[in-house]
Amino acid sequence: MSDSLLRRKIIVRDQPHGHGLARTLSWPHLVALGVGAIVGTGILTLIGVGADKAGPAVILSFVVAGLICACAALAYAEMATMIPASGSAYTYSYVVIGELIAWVVGWSLILEYSLVVSAVAVGWSGYAAPLLHAWADVPMTLMQGPELGGIVNLPAVAIIAVVAGMLLFGTRESATVNAILVLVKIAALVVFVAVALPAFNAANLEPFSPYGFAKHMGADGVERGVMAAAAIIFFAFYGFDAIATAAEETKNPDRDLKIGIVGSMIACVIIYIAVAVAAVGAVSYSRFANSPEPLALILRELGQARAAQYLGISAVVALPTVILAFFFGQSRIFFTMARDGLLPASLAKLSARGTPVRITIFTAIVVAILAGFIPLDELAALANAGTLAAFTAVSVCMLIMRVRAPQAPRTFRAPMPWVIGTIAVLGCFYLFLSLPVKTQTWFGIWNVAGLAVYFLYARRNAVAT
């Protein structure tokens, strides 16, 4: 039994006809996919939450979270070029560590991507619903979930259906549309920085760190500190892992994957720090802390109503890029696990365009139900838990391969691997411990359920490797 639990997968670069995804993506598509996933609801909303927890030192929180994610991204880049196959952290764990750990990682990724897609769809609906109500007189009960007194969040369900249709139409075509929308989103953030930065006032940075560095419980019962904010802001950085799920659809994976992963992370760290500096320097953090639309609020505080409106409209237009990127990653994780026999093999059926039709439709149904009916305010943190598990696994895989196969071909080698890997592993472990106890409990329950599925179905149906 122990042998089967630890059996490792052998990667076949060229899958048999009908089992391999079509190679249609180049590095510009991958960079756009990564930036599209990373730059989204995190920077548009979480900077307000972070400011409430850390004050102006939220800038430092972005640096800390960005450093941990950057180290994980370097590990991803090395593993992606060594193992250029669909499945991301799940596949790397299957090849390097073994089937049981791979299942846990894959099960965690399913949780992460499902919650992110659903949560971003609901967040997008929050921008779109007032517009639909004002322009088309659509009843609000049809645009809010039951937790808000509505019937179903139709805008969230509709945007998921649109994105699913794009992915069914073709990977390259949907990636091209994604690249265009990413430019819209980046332009909006550039406008924000251009308008807010000239209003920078050093007095708004005092006191810089009113709540200290380490996480602690404030008098009001709210966890505060630079690290408490970093644990939340971490959500704003991940998304580059979606690039690794596209390895099998990349024209030149040895070159394009490292450019896509590292390039998107560098671009996003620069964007985030610039936005954070402009935001906390323009107005006092207390005026936008915990706002659901902090950047637009800052612009209105500066008397730039038109710029604020432009930012809001751009969010409605461009936030679907986040949904697309994570929806893409979710369907590819499902597809790879189904192809390996750990999930029903019928889900791995490809269309004539080389896209996984059944798994995309199945994924759309699952995340649409979550977005349409389930309140995600407390469960959204579970997305962070799943991501931290995956990041830790990939970093451990990189270190294991440095010992097991130090001379194996690597078109990208992470610099100072033991430093990079250690920072990623310990940093992710700390951030996991910083999550609410309720979140850790639900994550444990999810994985207990996953182990039951593994031993009752997946283990005996896994394709021999």
Image (spheres, helix red, strand yellow):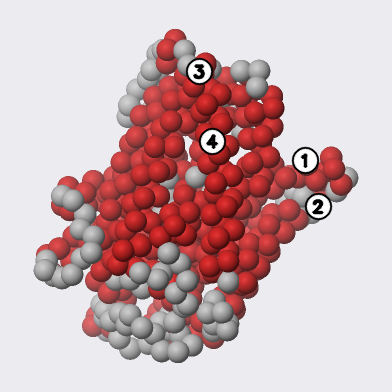
Counting other residues with Cα less than 10 Å from the Cα at mark 4, is it few (<14), some (14-19), or many (20 or more)?
Answer: many
Mark found first going from the N terminus, 2 or 4:
2
Q: Mark 2 points at which residue?
A: 142
Say which amino acid is labelled 3.
Answer: Pro
Where disc 2 sits, the SS reads: helix
Chain-order first, disc 3 or disc 2: 2
Instruction: Tell me the quarter of the picture where residue 310 sits.
Output: top right
Residue 53 position by quadrant: top left
In the rendered structure, the answer to whether residue 199 lies left or right of residue 91 reads right
Q: In this view, does 45 lie to the left or right of 397?
A: right
Q: Is mark 4 on a helix, strand or loop?
A: helix
Q: What residue type is labelled 4?
A: Leu
Q: Distance between the residues labelled 2 and 1?
A: 12 Å
From the viewer's perspective, is the residue at label 3 or at label 2 nearer?
A: 3
| Percent coordinates x, y for residue 129 in the rendering | 75, 45
Up-down: is 350 above or below 158? below
Q: Is mark 1 on a helix, strand or loop?
A: helix
What residue is disc 3 on? 198
Q: Distance between the residues labelled 3 and 1?
A: 31 Å
187 relative to 255, above or below: above
Give whichever of 10, 183 is nearer the camera. 183
Q: Where is residue 19 in the image (x, y as percent from the top left)?
A: 46, 85
Residue 346 is left or right of residue 209, and the answer is right
Q: Marks 3 and 4: in contact by CB < 8 Å? A: no
| Residue 189: image tag | 4
Q: Which residue is drawn at 68% across and 64% down?
A: 161
Report the residue at 57% width, 84% height from top.
352
Tell me the residue that label 1 is attached to: 130
For the residues bearing labels 2 and 4, Cβ distance under 8 angstroms: no
Work out which quarter of the rendered image holds the C terminus and state it. bottom left
The part of the image, by quadrant, that contains residue 2 is: bottom left
Label 2 packing within 10 angstroms: few (<14), some (14-19), many (20+): some
